[in-house]
Amino acid sequence: MISLVMAAYNRAHTLPRALDSVLAQDWQDWEVIVVDDGSTDATQAVVARYADPRIKLVTHEVNRGVTAAKNTGFDRCTGEWIATLDSDDALAPGALSTFMRVLSEVDPTLDAVSCNCVDSRTGRFSGQGWSGDQYIDVARSLSETRGEFWGMFHRRILGAHRFDERIAGREAALWTRIHAGARWYYLHQGLRIYHTEGDDRITSRKLSNFRSNPRQYRSYVVLTEEAADYLELLRRHSPRQYGDVQSAAAAQFLASGDLRRAAMALRDTAVGYGLAAVARLKRR
């Protein structure tokens, strides 16, 4: 069985698209765990209209954030394979059966299978860096790709790992951890339709726009002091991204008046951007 975890906060208007795309799959051995994260709209009513026992609703009384909602979903999964699907996105026709065919025809020992996404606005792949089906690993994922990809993983590599709910907007820390050392395959097909209308994902921020934010401050403290394994992988394999993370941390520390942490983050910003510059020179 494939378990799909869907976090939803005030997504009554997009949930039907996501759920209908799952119901339309030719692979029918699935469950959807919809976690309503304290919505104030008709999210629960929308889910209730689907009279399918495979679509299961779990509710948070208050909004706890997307990582908390996904953690709740992981705890409720019963499938051997797990994937997350954003509540404003959709599966391409045949997506689940395509994944399962990779397991039966390419390598039944795989821990994870990934694919590209199709940007709904352009019809093009949103993930860049790879072409052709191939085995991949975390180092290559960090150093060679950018953009939006998707995939499913076996529950054995998730284990007890969960998102650190104290860290805002850094889901990649968990994905990097569970895929490190995994037997992982990339399928060069767009199996998830990536929608961005009304999107609240944060892609970039100017340093001048940062303001003191206690939650963001605590988030960056945890990230820089307790996620050393993730940051080291970034430093080694994606120094530019490492510099971006440290730069954002430095801005929040400065805005919060924490000069000591700001100085350390600025130092590491320089390290990241310096390593990225050296890597560019070597490629010339």
Image (cartoon, rainbow, N blue to C red):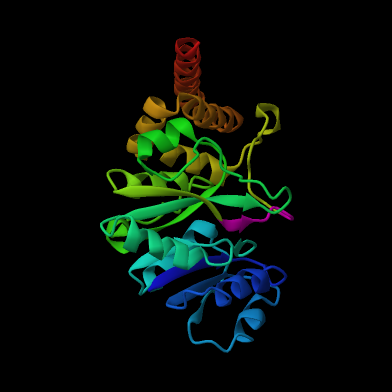
Instruction: Say which residue appears at 47% left-offset and 42% top-offset.
Output: 132
Q: Is residue 82 magenta?
A: no
Is residue 154 something one can see in this rendering? no
Lateral position of residue 179 relative to residue 69, left or right? left
- Residue 92 point in image, percent of width and height: 59, 63
Q: Nearer the viewer, residue 206 or 11?
A: 11
Instruction: Say which residue appears at 32% left-offset and 58% top-offset.
Output: 158
Q: Is residue 192 magenta?
A: yes
Lateral position of residue 245 relative to residue 195, left or right? left
- Residue 128 point in image, percent of width and height: 56, 38
Is residue 168 something one can see in this rendering? yes
Instruction: Say which residue appears at 53% left-offset and 67% top-offset.
Output: 94
- Residue 22 point in image, percent of width and height: 56, 72
Q: Quadrant of residue 155?
A: bottom left
Q: Magenta segment range? A: 191-198
Relative to 237, residue 284 above or below? above
